[in-house]
Image (spheres, helix red, strand yellow):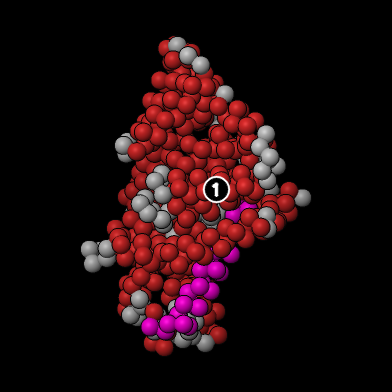
Amino acid sequence: MDLTLVGIFAIIGLLLFLLLGTYIAIDFLFIGLAGSIIILGMKPALQLLGQTMYHSIATPNFAALPLFVLMGAFAARGGFAKKAYEGVQGMTAGLPGSLAIASCFGCAAFGAISGSSLATAAIFGKLALPEMQRYKYNKKLALGSIAAAGTFAAMIPPSGGFIVYAIFTGQSVGRLFMAGILPGLITAVVYSLSIMIRVKRNPDLAPTDKEEKKDFKGRISSVSKIWTIALLAIIVLGGIYSGLFTPTEAAAAGAFATLLLGIQQGKIRKFSIVKEALRESAATTSMIFLIIISALFFSRFLAITQIPNKLSMMVQSLTCPNIFILIAILFLWFILGMIIIPTGIFALTLPIVFPIIVNLGYDPIWFGVISLKLSEIAAVTPPVGLNVYALKGVAGKETTIEEVFSGIWPFVICDIIVLILLLMFPEITLWLPNLMAK
């Protein structure tokens, strides 16, 4: 049978399995193995699977992922999210919609030591939602600001999404981390401006006149609450930027420092808490690893079919401007993001899309940030919208999933504005990585 035809049938079969709702890692593994057996035979196909499983794990990039996941688990149990929220809340007091703004920048601060979009949305749902309800905030504004703000925790380094992207593309984790800082902060600023404009136009959304206002001394005191987060960010990001640490070493140092600070703050007092964090990290990491390993195996099978090379040559032969091809790829990812988790999208599309992007002359670090920005939008858009479901889980029975989804759309518009900025001005993304290179 023709190699390309086998690849086409394999892709169709994979999409059918995904539509049936089966686990994506098993889909990659089963379809890739079946296609490899057809092309290579049973024994060579099993050898290819074994080689892929070993070589995909035996890479330094993989070691950083579980360590950053562990750092986030220690941070969640060490009370760092509460400190981030209280610290930022004191600084924003008196602004229109200050509690919603505090959620945005609090998520950004916590993202600097967590990197988990789902965990950030769930934790801030417990912290910020009751506070906004106490001050009679509009429910959709409250829910939308938390669900959406949780997403750019994945952009602020350390980011598991960037590590996954690096594994599939061979890019520098450190440069990707640096590239995510400005886009993440810009997103927080755009969200906050949107909240202020909406509240100014409709004060009933957030009755700020009832909120406590703080003087300059009180605001400085609030800033001091986030010293632990600032210290951890300096250890991890400063270590990578200065060249003192590799990303894996920075992850190890960050996880250990987070544990020590959690103990020092009195939040991690029992060994059972450490065991719980280790168990959660192992479960999360094993799930991600299984998806990545099976997806890498599927991508090797696709390489045998030569579909990626043929698609790349076909795209290069097109006479339309490169920007139209890029927009078509982004639109495809936007649609896929509504039905597949971000790791699955990377696994499914990067083996095909990445060579095309590189051949078109686009910077792979910049494209990594664009990819993660689209993943952020996917994290709050139906029907998957994992952040929305995470927030619904902690918001209680009195909150419906429809209320959360209806509250996120103004923030999706903000994300699209930021995405357009990043597309128009790649320097926003590449400025810090280029300084790092020098």
Q: Residues within 10 Å of mark 1 (few under 14, many from 20)?
A: some
Where is residue 398 shown, x and y percent of the image?
A: 23, 67
Q: Name, please, the residue furthest toward the left.
A: 397
Q: What residue sits 36% from the left and 50% below the top?
A: 384
Q: Nearer the viewer, residue 380 or 133?
A: 380
Q: Name, please, the residue furthest toward the right.
A: 438
Q: Tell me the chief SS of the magenta region.
A: helix
- Residue 55 appearing in the image: no
Where is residue 267 shown, x and y percent of the image?
A: 38, 61
- In this rendering, the answer to whether 246 lies above or below 135 is above
Q: Nearer the viewer, residue 49 or 111?
A: 49
The residue pinned by badge 1 equals 330
Q: What residue sits 48% from the left and 37% below the top?
A: 347
Q: Tag 1's secondary structure?
A: helix
Q: What residue sits 65% from the left and 30% below the top?
A: 313
Q: Nearer the viewer, residue 424 or 93?
A: 424
Q: Amino acid at mark 1?
A: Leu
- In this rendering, the answer to whether 267 lies above or below 4 is below
Relative horizontal placement of residue 268, taking residue 411 as reference (left or right):
left
- Residue 349 appearing in the image: yes
Q: Nearer the viewer, residue 394 or 261?
A: 394
Residue 25 colored magenta?
no
Where is residue 52 shown, x and y percent of the image?
A: 50, 24
Relative horizontal placement of residue 412, taking residue 368 as reference (left or right):
left
* Stretch in magenta: 177-204
- In this rendering, the answer to whether 335 lies above or below 267 is above
Where is residue 116 shown, x and y percent of the image?
A: 45, 53
Residue 173 lies in quadrant: top right
Residue 199 colored magenta?
yes
- In this rendering, the answer to whether 197 lies above or below 250 is below
Relative horizontal placement of residue 45, taking residue 245 as reference (left or right):
left
